[in-house]
Image: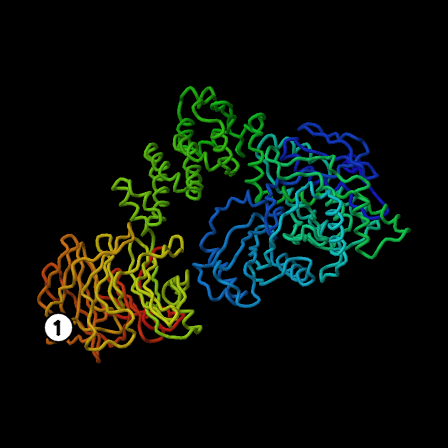
Amino acid sequence: MQLLVRFGVLSYSGSVLSLSLSSTGFLARKIMNSGQKVKCMSDGAGNVGRCVKDDADSDGLAGGDSLMVAEERHSRAASPRGANGDDDSEAESHLDGRNVEVDPDTRKRAFSWCRDFLSGSWKAISEHDFKIKIVSGGLSNLLYMCSLPDDVQPAGIEPRRVLLRIYGAILQGVDSLVLESVMFAILAERELGPRLYGIFPEGRLEQYLPSNRLCTEQLGIPEISAEIASKMARFHGMVMPFNKEPKWLFGTIDKYMEQVKTIKFVREAHVKKFNKLIKYDLPAELESLRSLLAATPSPVVFCHNDVQEGNILMLDGRENSSDKLMLIDFEYSSYNYRGFDFGNHFCEWIYDYTYDQWPFYKAKVENYPDRQQQLHFIRHYLSERGGIAPPDQARIEDMIIEANRLNWVQFGQADSGVFEEKSDNLQSYVWRTNQDYRTYRHQSNGPLVMVQTSTHTFHVDLEKLADCSEYFKALSHSSMRETSEGLVHLEHVPSSVFHSLLEFCFLQRFCVPEDLLGEHLRVSTYLLASGFTDRLLIALSQALTECTCLGYLQLAEELCSEELQETVLTYLSKYLLERPHLSKGLEPHHKKKLLKLRSKGSPHLCCLRKENLTSRNDLETEAARSLFRLEGEGDDGKWSSPTDLPFCADKWCFTTVVLYNYLYIIGGYRHRVKKGYEFKMASFRYNPFTNQWVSTAPLIKHRRHFSAAVCEGRIFAVGGWYLDSLVTPDSNTGIYTAVERYDPWTDTWAFVSSLPLTDFQFSLSLSHDSPLTTSLGHCLYVLGNIQRTGEKLVLRYDSRQDCWCELLPTLTRSSAELPILHFLGATKSQLVVIGGNNSKTMVTSFCVDSQKWGCVRAMEKTSLIGQGTILHNKVYMSGMKDNSVVKLNLHSLSLCPLPSLPVSTCYESIFHLYF
């Protein structure tokens, strides 16, 4: 009973929670906090005594029989403004380490959930128009606000905006998720929490409540305190379908106690405190406490277990109402001793978690509710439960007790794996004044050397440090004076940077501020600490901005670091065309590498419907308005949809082309105007690295079924006919001779030399682009069927000279009966031609150097349609059978069907992208 005697126990005839419970958390926290512990002392009447600080070597507490009623909570940098986004157990939005931008995968999943669960107008918008932003997030949940575009109104009762909650690290296991979900649904139905719009394994959609979180000072306002008491009473009065035994409290204690026992300490300061405090028999203390509580007549009710300011919302527009508050964050709610909710809430009056200096909270003991404030709270609690009769004054007296907060104290220690980086950040200044925190040993207990840095000396296990740094490895194997004397001079190395290196090497902790990454990279490169450098580069890749990237590129040149250079160039390549000004002044070899980085890795086969003429808004049309990507190979392959097409229409006609691993779709789609419909010219660019679409300049000519090819970093649009002509072309319909060239850097189209169709015309096709076009080197090649003779003629365009010429001879009908042309591609110095007739499909080639046609090879009749692509001597095109895409081996002419598309094949475009 040592700790029970040492810390004291407060018992009342009403409800009780002994503060000696916090001894377990005291052990964990004391080890971590180097003696900086604030203790709130109280007497049996609920009056708070003085605040004392416990240094590293002191175990005594002032006040003999007094009781420690609170320990510091994990730091909370709470933003007072928010919606129903919990800002407490979530470890705070300002500390969650995420980028301001929502990552593409989360955006896609969020859009899918909103569309499926909310329906109405949510089904009519595209992912491009979908709005999402981060609210807060951290350990328990990640929170996002999702909303319709400003110009889209709800079609029915669906909400205009919702809060998306994605479960995080604290809600572990199926049981926790099920209980929390059921609890939230019941509370929403009883109007004690936000409405529930959708629930799924990863999280839920709930009502977005414009509001402000309370701050610590507001808890003591009589009007607010009264309403909190009423809300708590309603909460306690609920009958929930959960275990009615108060198992949560001790179950949580036991779980964290077991985890605390397994924690290993490396720092000498930690080991010293641990060895001192572990002498106390904490398991025996807890057993004594179980007996104490079992003997105390404390009512067991359904408790919130975390009624603190961050979990209490002041709803917008209700500031003057008697029903202006709402409790949130129910993940810790369970059946528990009623006194726990009272005591935990009263302790929260003391602590300001928005304090911006070490230790990042501030305890104002004078704010603890005095007896009159506690009476005020309890009276309103009982009033909500059915009024107060004169004899109830005794009940009020019995209910005024103090309760502990040990679950939060242990929470921070037992989940040290989750909190490690943040708790270390909070103590980042301790090492400056405490030599113990500048001593780093390893399990091997190797020899220590002193390393003198700019302002501080560190004592370090040289053997371990040699494993992390080639500099120290060479030093340890040398006979230099530094090794023999055990003193290494690194006065030019900033002490804070060397401390970060040691934290990473010995404790696997990484907490380097973004603005100091460059300074750390200098030292890490100098010391040849490759592991630390790699981790710095990962952090840098997430922190680079258009304002900082060129500075880091210059640093890479200065340090001769290829890894740093590639990190920066990877960032620049990711936004190559979005931020062209950044790469404009780069050296030619850097620009060349940027383009290579755009196509790094393995390409994915992709497909989209390039033309749709169905004039109805059915599910098939909606499903077809997607880009599909093939995952896996063979029978295990499956098509997925990383994004939808960036427009809403039932009819469209586009040609696709890939430039610098950006997908361009060029053409137009039907949209409503005052007097019916018309086709709107439109072009879009898709970046697979960011999963984002942007609009680009449309064509000058209104084209349909035209070809497009990339040559010398430009896109060329060739042929086609008038876009609004949706009927079958007749003898009067002719191919456009005008050729357009697109500059991706200026986002402009311009005319170049026209097709030389002076005394002949190419025939048209409804199943393929007319004429077919590809590129090889700095030239475009166009293949068409001459209408009068049926000959196949190749035209060549020299992009450097801006001129056309015919490549003779033609392929005559006597050489090959090819009334239909399916595909034109290029490989090495040859053009690959696929065509056919009513009985068979044929493959031939044309050598652009010798201007000779290859042999014509026949294969089984295959229906090919749309726009294909060629890669590694294999042609990929969509077929008419089984919604399939086929792969044709040009060597063997073997045909292999790929997995069926999730939509029927109509007029598809096939291409490759790197993701």
Can the viewer see residue 827?
yes
Tell me the crowding category of disc 1: few under 14, some 14 to 19, or many 20 or more residues within 10 angstroms, Cα based: many
Q: Name the quadrant of the C terminus.
A: bottom left
751 horizontally vs 604: left or right: left
Above or below residue 453? Residue 87 is below
Q: Position of residue 568 (x, y in %)?
A: 36, 41
Above or below residue 474? Residue 145 is below
Viewer-proximal residue among 580 and 552: 580
578 horizontally vs 68: left or right: left
Q: Which residue is mark 1?
A: 791
The amino acid beneath tag 1 is Glu
SS assignment at label 1: loop
Q: Position of residue 794 (x, y in %)?
A: 14, 65
Q: Position of residue 905 (x, y in %)?
A: 35, 72
Viewer-proximal residue among 175 and 43: 43
Residue drawn where x is 53% and y is 64% of the image: 154
Can the viewer see residue 247?
no
Q: Name the quadrant of the N terminus.
A: top right
Marker count (numbered) = 1
Q: Quadrant of residue 818?
A: bottom left
Q: Position of residue 487 (x, y in %)?
A: 47, 21
Q: Quadrant of residue 570?
A: top left
